[in-house]
Amino acid sequence: MKIREKIDKALFWLLVSLMSLMVLNVLWQVASRYLFKSPSSFTDELARFILIWVGLLGASYVAGKKMHLAIDILPSKMHGKKARNLSIFTNLVVAAFAFLVLVWGGIKLVYITLKLEQTSAALNIPLGYVYTVLPLSGLLIIYYSLVNMRQQGAEPEEIGKELA
């Protein structure tokens, strides 16, 4: 669990840093617009990109902390082996979604945007760099899902038996 604690801590401080940067960025936008009467050209785009990163990495972080939104009517009524099996199934579905949509789809998106050399309008940075957060957050969600399954006491070979 030492690795998980290190990942949690690093992700927490990355999110704190990104949020702080976004606040400073938006404050500069407001100050440049209303105090100096010369709005900054890059702040809107930077705020948008930081928000994308905060949203996706924040989703990974709360998935790891098991604080994400969930409908818990069914799990709250189950106990013992049934609750454990449902938790394992749920984590498998989350991991599969994260792999297919975030990792696989994200890698394709990053590749295509880098190959086409798409850049952002104001910051003039390759959009592929902005989109790297998709596979990164997908890998984090998969990691947390696997760790959560392991905490449930299920070994990988057990998972297939229980769901069959």
Image (tube, helix red, strand yellow):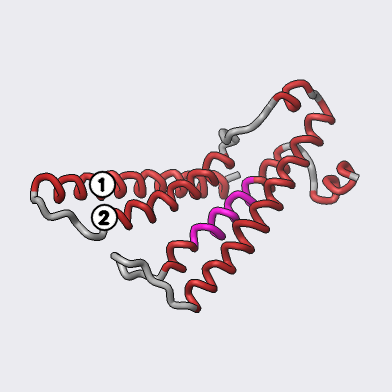
| Pointer 1 residue | 26
Which element is circle 1 on? helix
Label pair 1/2, CB-CB below 8 angstroms: yes
Q: Residue at x 34, y 48 (%)?
A: 17
Say if the magenta span includes residue 57: no
Q: Residue at x 31, y 48 (%)?
A: 22
Determine the CA span between mark 1 and mark 2.
7 Å
The residue closer to the viewer here, 18 or 131, is 131
* Residue interval drawn in magenta: 132-144
Sequence-first disc among 1 and 2: 1
| Pointer 2 residue | 43
Q: Residue at x 21, y 44 (%)?
A: 27
Would residue 72 appear left or right of 69 to someone viewing this image? Answer: right
Q: Is residue 8 above or below residue 69?
A: below
Q: Residue 113 in the image: state x and y as whole percent.
A: 49, 72
Q: Residue 10 in the image: state x and y as whole percent.
A: 45, 49
